[in-house]
Amino acid sequence: MEEHTFFEYEDVKVTNARFISGGQTFAMNNVTSVKPYEQKPSRLGGILVLGVGLIIAAVANVIVGVLIALAAVYYMVEQKTVYHVLLSTSAGETTALVTHQRDYLNQVIAALNDAIVHRG
């Protein structure tokens, strides 16, 4: 049976026979299901530093406190959600791909689902 490519971008490739991601190769005949996992960043550290900055601004030095608070806000804004592709196989569940781009993740998952359907 000829290998059919469903998706290929940089080091990720999905065919009806295999899924290559970051140097790992998974045989598609072993993959039973594919699902996304969304890991939201923890904002607790940023919130605590923001609180410290506001307290310093109110009690001691306004400029230093505001700078600390602004740094905390910047830190929280710059944190990004991490998206994972989880593959279920006979050996269990494994993380096959990690990215910050939701659209990219959706394209890979769609290609993996197409490859599973194509396999029959």
Image (spheres, rainbow, N blue to C red):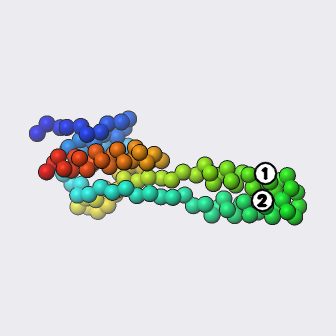
Residue 45 on image: x %, y %:
65, 61
Q: Is residue 95 visible?
A: no
Q: Nearer the viewer, residue 105 or 17?
A: 105
User: Which corner quadrant of the image does residue 54 belong to?
Assistant: bottom right
User: Which corner quadrant of the image does residue 101 belong to?
Assistant: top left
User: Which corner quadrant of the image does residue 55 belong to?
Assistant: bottom right
58 on left or right of 42: right
User: How busy is the neighbourhood of tag 2: few (under 14 within 10 Å), some, or many (20 plus)?
Assistant: many
Q: What amino acid type should be assigned to the residue bearing mark 1?
A: Leu
Q: Which residue is mark 1?
A: 67
Residue 94 on image: x %, y %:
34, 57
Q: Which residue is mark 2?
A: 53
Circle 2: element type: helix
Quarter that holds the N terminus: top left
Q: Residue at x 76, y 63 (%)?
A: 52
Residue 79 on image: x %, y %:
58, 52
Instruction: Check the image and report above or below for 87 versus 4.
Output: below
Distance in Å between CA atoms under marks 1 and 2: 7 Å
Q: Residue at x 20, y 43 (%)?
A: 16
Q: Earlier in the sequence, mark 1 or mark 2?
A: 2
Q: Are marks 1 and 2 in contact (CB under 8 Å)?
A: yes
Q: Residue at x 43, y 48 (%)?
A: 102
Q: Residue at x 23, y 61 (%)?
A: 90
